[in-house]
Image (cartoon, grey):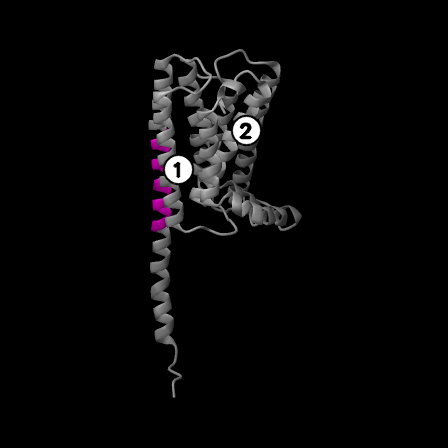
Amino acid sequence: MAVHAHPVSADLGLFAHGLALAGMATAIAYYWAASRLLRRGDAWPRWRTISFIAGSAGVAWIAVSPLPGEPFTAHMTEHLILGMVAPLLLVLARPFTLALRVLPPGTARRSLLTLMHSRPAAWLVFPPVAALLDLGGLWLLYRTELFAAVQHHPLGHALMHAHVLAVGLLFTFSICQLDPVRHRRNLPLRGATLLAAGAAHAVLAKALYATPPPGTAFAPADVQTGAQVMYYGGDVVEAALAVVLAASWYQAAGRTRHRRPRTNLRRTASPDTSP
């Protein structure tokens, strides 16, 4: 999930640097693809490129540069960036849409479309499933002795990093649904899932404020500050997701209003063929 304030083994260091390099490589690839679109005269908002680069930089930074401060508070700040802030910045950039626009017709483009429209992908980005994977994993991590165990195992620590980033991306993608998907879920379902996930996240933060993760020996003040970071930071990111949903509803309503006059005009212009 995030880098802790304890000695980092060679294996964990290798994974962290690999994650940082992957973040930098995806940022470079995105910038190249966006620049290619602009060079050929196609429109692509520059703020999306900035958003993707910022999200990738956040992942790379967390991987190789632990935040200063008390261990649990630093961990929670890193968790917030890696599992919530970076996924939001990456998803807002619509990377799959960019890839589909840049790739020429052929095997690579068809393979990407097939993957995005596959049944397993549709289930993974079904909002309740994505929320269960995300929030369920957090409850399992912090309300059992799993968190204490992975602190001293480099492989487990690395898997925790990968899991939190992956499920954070899945959840954010499932709520926003800005890129092409097999089934675009309706706004009420996504909104209700966001509310339920936000409530589960808040309850977990309050539980941590009262009692630290089992098997750990963090200072009480450190745990309480970390829980506050989780609670209030999560609220901010969830509010941003709500804004994305509201914007999607506004755009959908606008398209419906624009279609309605054209439909009425066509009906008015159609000749009356009744006997």
Q: Is residue 118 above or below residue 47?
A: below
Dividing the picture into quadrants, the one containing residue 204 is top left
Q: Residue at x 37, y 68 (%)?
A: 263
Q: Earlier in the sequence, mark 1 or mark 2?
A: 2
Q: State the residue position of label 2.
A: 162
For numbered disc 2, what is the local secondary structure? helix
Of marks 1 and 2, the one in the foreground: 1
**Looking at the image, residue 27 lies above or below residue 148:** below
| Residue 189 appears left or right of 59 | left
Left or right, 268 with respect to 82, comes to left
Main SS of the magenta segment? helix
Q: Is residue 88 above or below residue 74?
A: below
Residue 97, percent across and down?
Answer: 51, 45
Gap in angstroms between the C-alphas marked 1 and 2: 20 Å
Q: Can the viewer see residue 211 in this picture?
A: yes
Q: Position of residue 27 (x, y in %)?
A: 53, 32
Quarter of the image where the C terminus is located: bottom left
| Residue situated in front as seen by the camera: 210 or 221 | 210
Please state the total of marks drawn on the protein image. Answer: 2
Can you identify the residue that label 1 sits on? Answer: 197
Where are the magenta residues, as a range? Answer: 234-250
Q: Residues within 10 Å of mark 2 (few under 14, many from 20)?
A: some
Please indicate whether residue 194 sits to the left or right of residue 93 in the image: left
- Most extreme residue toward the right is 107
Q: Eyeballing the image, is 268 above or below 102?
A: below
- The percent coordinates of residue 195 (x first, y second) are 35, 40
